[in-house]
Image (tube, rainbow, N blue to C red):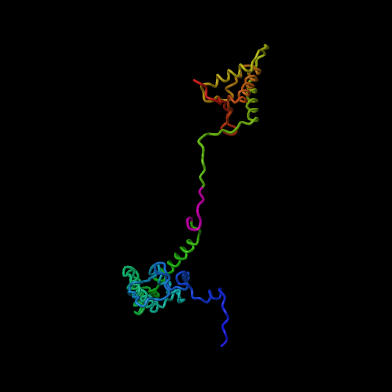
Amino acid sequence: MSPEAPTSGDDAAQGAPPDTATATPPIDGVALARLYGEPLFRMPSDLYIPPDALEVFLETFEGPLDLLLYLIRRQNFNIFDIPLAQVTRQYLDYVEQIREHNLELASEYLLMAAMLIEIKSRMLLPPKPTADGAEPEDPRAELVRRLLEYEQMKLAAAQLDALPVIGRDFLRAQVTMEQSNVTVFPDVSLADLREAWADILKRAKLNQHHHISREQLSVREYMTKMLRRLQGVRYVEFQELFDTATSPTVMVVTFIAMLELSREHLLEVTQAEAFAPIYVRLAYTPLQ
């Protein structure tokens, strides 16, 4: 009898049975079920399951027409030549199943079952002759018409459901923008000032007088006059600041005074929109 080779520490650890106190429980693929979070590996011998403890019933149809159309399409029956005996038997089998579980739901299907039985009985009887001698109408014609209309509506509903729906397939982007209630007037360009000044000069030439005199004009004096003119009013139109009855020299000095006040930020020149009248107002609130 040959002596056994000594085992190392790792081999001994691998050959030893696992410690049940510290072993990790197996994954759910090994366990039969989980009971209060703990894995269950074998069925209890004293387990009793009442017959009504688990009941699964799938309502896969939306109504009697849906069930009837399913039975016809599943067996590739011609919808214009329905084998009513076979379809009625399958339909009644399904109604019997749902009646055992939900009598209220079965009442809706029983109405269609009565209609199928009536059509079947009418097909067994000899057809009644018509007054004009034409071929009598097939008792299944009304049922076929309802089935075709239902199938068209069902296909249309499926196509509509395939379309993207807000809240299900995509979300509407919402952006919040902070809007200020302060009215911001556009800046007045030099071209607008030049056109307004040219218009004033054009009208001033209509009131020219051949009177030669020498005037001592002060820009500061006209700046003061303009500030007094603008006090107490919200704004004054650009053309009202100039008196066309005076000489062009006075109007030039008045225009220079306005430009100086604007440069010193004592008044503002505004315009509501393009080609709109130009207004002049004080850039500060005068003391009362």
Q: Nearer the viewer, residue 77 or 140?
A: 77
Residue 169 in the magenta stretch? The answer is yes
* Lateral position of residue 45 relative to residue 210, left or right: left
User: Looking at this rendering, what residue extends furthest in the bottom direction?
Assistant: 1
Q: Position of residue 260 (x, y in %)?
A: 63, 23
Q: Is residue 3 visible from the viewing direction of this image?
A: yes
Q: Position of residue 71 (x, y in %)?
A: 42, 74
Residue at position x 63%, y 31% in the image:
189
Q: Main secondary structure of the magenta part?
A: loop
* Lateral position of residue 81 relative to residue 251, left or right: left
* Lateral position of residue 65 relative to residue 168, left or right: left
Residue 122 in the magenta stretch? The answer is no
* Total numbered labels: 0
Q: Position of residue 224 (x, y in %)?
A: 58, 18
Q: Is residue 65 visible from the viewing direction of this image?
A: no
Q: Position of residue 177 (x, y in %)?
A: 52, 43
Residue stretch in magenta: 166-174
Q: Tell me where residue 259 sits by quadrant.
A: top right
Q: Name the quarter where the N terminus is drawn.
A: bottom right
